[in-house]
Amino acid sequence: MTGLAVDDAAWRSAWRVRSPADKLALCVGLVLCALVLPPWPGAVLVGAVAVGLALGPARVPAGTFLRAIRWPMAFLAVGALTAVVTLDGGIPGWAPDAAARAGELVGRALAGTSAVLLLATTTPMSDLLPELRRLRVPDAVVEIASVTYRMLFLLLAALGSVREAQTARMGWSTAGRSYRSAGMLAAAVLTRSWDRAHRMHEGLAGRGMETGLRVLPEARPSSPAFLASTAVLLAAVVAVTGAVR
Amino acid sequence: MHIAEGFLPAAHAAGWALAAAPFVVHGARAVTREVRERPEATLLLGAAGAFTFVLSAIKLPSITGSSSHPTGTGAGAILFRPPVMALLGTVVLLFQALLLAHGGLTTLGANAFAFAVVGPWAAYGSYRLVRRLGGGLLPGVFVGTVLADLATYVTTSVQLALAFPDATGGIAGALVKFLGVFAFTQVPLAIGEGLLAVLLFRVLTVNARPELERLGVLRPAADQEAAA
């Protein structure tokens, strides 16, 4: 358990052993389909495929998937409503085709979010980051992102334990105390992160780190069958959308 | 607030990605140079990225009853400078998209422009201005952090207004709508995060003075004594 449900799901997923490049091709394809195809039926198909694959072959827990989608839902509800309300002379009213436009917006965004979540719940960040090198992202940036990913969980654990100690001492009992505690919590986490970075540097320098933090990536060969299925699936989504329109 | 995946039309998503790219590339170059000169910078910058991500997990009590989470880019820009934050902020946004489903991949450019470019520059610019006008560290930190959050919120509202102009009021009408709706959460958040940053820097000046001096946020104590 790491405290981030999506990350936990990614490590446990049945698709964890698949090549990250294969999963990227599938999920980026789905995201692009959600973005450019007409929302009906394109977005509905993309959403159904993404959720179906995640809960089916990839065996992601449905609860994790639903909980993760709650946050974007709040933004979508407020954002889509605001987009289709019109202020005519200061009086709010519905824009023409308000229901259809809101439906299109929410459908597209939910389909896209599901496709991103399919990637997020099947591929840990430590598998994805080396793929960034292939996209010509500089090594230094990939290494910083890798350190960020690895240190994240230490800091989240520190955050949890400091907050627990503060709560036990009534640190979060009133708004004023909460602010004071939040300030001290942030400072404690920041100084711990510096301390941790210094100690890691000393440890690595002692072992002769000169040219960066190269680690051997786990070999996960690309599966021709998976890539072929991806191509067929994406073509089917495009074809069905075209036929229905 | 992060714009969710798929919310922006394709042309807008691509346009904002192009707008954010030069700043992020400049940040990546600055960081690459820094790492080549000082290999330990990899670990310190990685730690800074992790801190920015974790800061958004701290829940602030809010006046309007909505829960608000700090963005961390204002304090980050004052500590690490805006070019570094353009890169770190984008990395953190990628992590938030893939670990928390906040934001998205196609909206990464738009979110990076608001959170990692406009916010940090607003923070750093106003912080330097307050310091130059004779304001102390803490007033500068407060103004910088509040303006970073407000600038981010206004930028996101502009992005949404450009994508979804109002049927009668056009882009200006849509901007009023989005600014109004998100003001309920974003204005209290800006003030709350400003207070949090002041408390954070107050603790840091006591407990982590050498680090602040090394980052150039505080002048070395010997200079101050000599000046006094």
Image (tube, grey):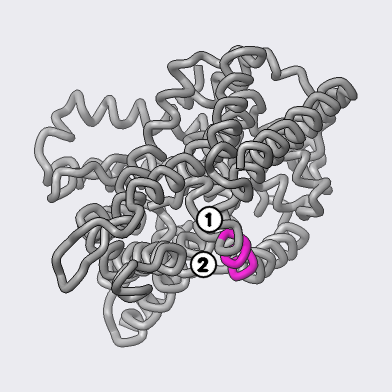
Residue B36 x %, y %? 77, 60
The residue at 30%/62% (across/down) is B178
At x 61%, y 22%, the residue is: A10
Q: Main secondary structure of the magenta part?
A: helix
Q: Position of residue B8 (x, y in %)?
A: 50, 55
**Chain at tag 1:** B
Residue that mark 2 sits on: B117
Q: Disc 2 versus disc 1: distance between alpha carbons?
A: 8 Å
The x and y percentages for residue A49 are: 62, 26
Q: Are marks 2 and 1 on the same chain?
A: yes
Residue at left offset 17%, top offset 28%: A169
Dividing the picture into quadrants, the one containing residue B72 is bottom left
For the magenta stretch, what is the residue range? B13-20
Q: Nearer the viewer, residue A82 or A170?
A: A82
- Look at 48% across and 16% down and name the residue there: A62
Q: Residues within 10 Å of mark 1 (few under 14, many from 20)?
A: many
Q: Position of residue A19 (x, y in %)?
A: 80, 26
Q: Do the residues bearing badges 2 and 1 touch, measured as CB atoms within 8 Å?
A: yes
Instruction: Identify the disc placed on residue B89.
Output: 1
Question: Eyeballing the image, is B66 above or below A120?
Answer: below
Q: Amino acid at mark 1?
A: Gly
